Image (cartoon, helix red, strand yellow):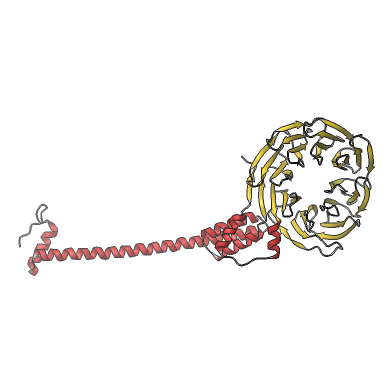
Amino acid sequence: MACDARDGRDGKSNALLKLVAGIVGLNFDELKQRDRQRNIQRLVVTSVVASTILAAAGALSAYALNERHIAESRTMAAASMNATGQNFDPAAGLQYAIQAADRAPTEEARNALAAALRSQDSLVILQHSTKINKAAISPMGSSILTCGDDAKARIWDLHTGQVVHELTGHTRRIHTCEFSPDGSEVVTAGTDLEPLIWDVRTGTSIAKLRGHTAAVMSARFSTNSAWLVTASEDGTVRVWNAKNGEARAKFYIPDEGAQDAFFIANDSNILGVSEKGPCTIWDLESGLKLKEFSGEMNWVQDAILSPKQTRFMISNKQYGPSFYSLPDATEISRAQTMNTYGGAFSADDSRAVTGSNEGEVWVWDLEAGVHIKTLLHPEAVDTMAISPNQETIVTGSDDGLRVWRMPEPGGGTAEQIGSLRGHKGAARVIMFAPHDNTRLLTIGVEDNTVRIWDLAHFLKVSNDQGPVLSLDELRKQARTRLPIRGSDHR
């Protein structure tokens, strides 16, 4: 059989097949068909082998990816447990736990979610870039007012965590800020001598209070929101029209500067407190001094008026707390202790709590005028609050925030329910939200945050760990428990 291997003729492949066909005595076309079939078989085998290799590689890759996700889930779960368990930041712990569950459905993620949910008591976290000196909740409970060392005050929306108004006008540190009882205005005061009144709706300044010659330490509205009283280191207590800033009255405090001042007796009298302790009551209409009282006072730590204005307390650095009935300023009781800090009254004025440098919190029955129970912290206690229903006490110290059950009238036990965790470092208890037993506002001394706490959740998980939930159920709950966050950075 003739064959020609040249290009354009049989070609090398066909020429070789013709030669083999001639040797073995087979038809060329039959041999060529067999060669084609072998090529197809080789191609199929090669394809199967390649597909198997690719499938195996894909399976290995998927396995490796799954293992990586499991490892990442466990790492995030560990970070969550650390944040939750080490008193660092339960809010961050909840976020880590959600990320762990999203990465892979590991048992570690489920456990981290459960632990973070039990510890997640913050509803709102507002971050400041500088020190916060005071905060307040609006009468309707929908806004927070903050002020601090950056000479600015801010009104925040509690539902979004956003700054609604940034109140700029002061030139130096702001010591104090307060909503009016009707919620329409805000007053701010500090070291630049001139308090400012603001319209809450617009965030604009209504009036500047001119007259003080030294730092203004306090500014408070009357109960009808019509007047303001300020106390200054210049030794004066002044009363102003809260709508236009016009001065109404001026009173002089003995023994250096004024520490604080209050409206009492249905806004008809003014109670002023000296930095060195003496207190004075004036009649607002006539300007006459009604009474001056001092007791054993040295340096006033806090002066606190009870909610119904029937009691007044001074915590004193040297001689302990003293309690007085109002408006006559008759002494009710005085503690024989030293270095007392802070205090709070119950909503009906019948109970009080005071703190001390020794880590003691004293619970008082003011009807009997006696100390009935001592609560213990390992560190000094300087701030505290009593819930409006008078069932819960919250105390603040360098070792954190603790929640207690109010002792029974006869003294009884004062059980510590647990601790509120989240602030980095010391925290100050400021107040419960108006008429709300479940929301508490605190300021972080070191982390420059304001937090609103959910005591309803805290009390529930303290008493009941609840049913065992699946990871998906826990993750769904966790997304609803993430706190609202806000920042003063714009």
Q: Quick one: which residue is furthest to the left in this view?
A: 1
Residue 148 vs 44, above or below: the answer is above
Residue 50 vs 447, above or below: the answer is below
> Where does the N terminus fall, quadrant-wise?
bottom left
Residue depicted at 68% across the width and 58% down the height: 457
Q: Is residue 138 visible?
A: yes
> Where does the C terminus fall, quadrant-wise?
top right
Residue 478 vs 214, above or below: the answer is below
Rendered location of residue 92, percent (x, y): 62, 54
Residue depicted at 7% across the width and 69% down the height: 25
Q: Quick one: which residue is furthest to the bottom in this view?
A: 24
* 268, 44: nearer the viewer: 268
Rendered location of residue 246, percent (x, y): 81, 30
Quadrant of res 221:
top right
Q: Is residue 423 visible?
A: no
* 141, 339: nearer the viewer: 141
Quadrant of res 59:
bottom left
* 323, 38: nearer the viewer: 323
Rendered location of residue 368, percent (x, y): 91, 57
* 200, 400: nearer the viewer: 200
* 461 relative to 378 in the view: left or right: left
Figure label count:
0
Residue 490 vs 384, above or below: the answer is above
* 228 relative to 154 in the view: left or right: right
* 97 relative to 400 in the view: left or right: left
Rendered location of residue 228, percent (x, y): 81, 37
